[in-house]
Amino acid sequence: DQQVKQNSPSLSVQEGRISILNCDYTNSMFDYFLWYKKYPAEGPTFLISISSIKDKNEDGRFTVFLNKSAKHLSLHIVPSQPGDSAVYFCAAHLGHTGNQFYFGTGTSLTVIP
Amino acid sequence: DSGVTQTPKHLITATGQRVTLRCSPRSGDLSVYWYQQSLDQGLQFLIQYYNGEERAKGNILERFSAQQFPDLHSELNLSSLELGDSALYFCASSVAANEKLFFGSGTQLSVL
């Protein structure tokens, strides 16, 4: 049962434009959400997070939006840069049954120069 | 560099064999997580340890086991290996059980 879903396996964006990566989840008990970025031959690295009590968190070029009623979050990257080309994983934390992080299947972002 | 060290980076073995993957967490991190990433799959949670004790279990097969030692390093043991066990295995650590994870670079396991 995939509790966190990223329905777009890949995304291509022109340099300088906005990249929007989407993530849907099913469990309303998740208490915070994270985005990780992964380059080939490396482990995922933390990018940005958002608590379930907020609807937006911003860090430089990266903004995460949370819509709890729709059980949807998105990551906006503005402006996109070629170095942003990577696989992006959405993750959700569930604390009340033992701390677990559930990950989506990832979206491969390609930023075209 | 995340500070999480995984060894070996690559492992090639045959079906039926047993292997051990090792993870050293970041200095000061008490919590260790193991994840499996198969082709075109997300990161599947296997198991979590906190300060030597098992805290949470995911979709870990009975053929797999793990432990966290007093020095906080962790080992994931995979036995009676099957072709389908070929995957990238990640270890992650965090300072507390509900803090964000820092990942190692993974161990690529190939079962032939």
Image (spheres, rainbow, N blue to C red):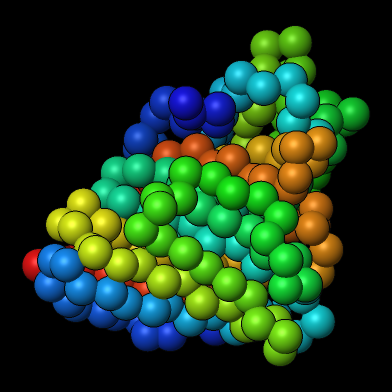
Q: Is residue A14 above or below residue A81?
A: above
| Res B99 quadrant in image | bottom right
Q: How many marks?
A: 0
The residue under the point 71% across, 89% down is B71
Left or right for B67, reference A82:
right
**Vertical relation: B108 (above or below) B22:** above
Q: Where does the C terminus of chain B fall, quadrant-wise?
A: bottom left
Visible in this render: residue B100?
A: yes
**Residue B96 or residue A11, whichever sits in front:** B96
Closer to us: B45 or A9: B45
Q: Left or right: where does residue A63 sit relative to residue B9? A: right
Q: Position of residue A68 (x, y in %)?
A: 76, 18
Write the residue at 55% across / 27% down.
A3
Q: Position of residue B46 (x, y in %)?
A: 51, 53
Query: Residue at the left extreme?
Result: B112
The residue shown at (83%, 63%) is B96
Q: As displayed, is residue B48 above or below residue B27?
A: above
Give the quadrant of residue A54. Answer: top right
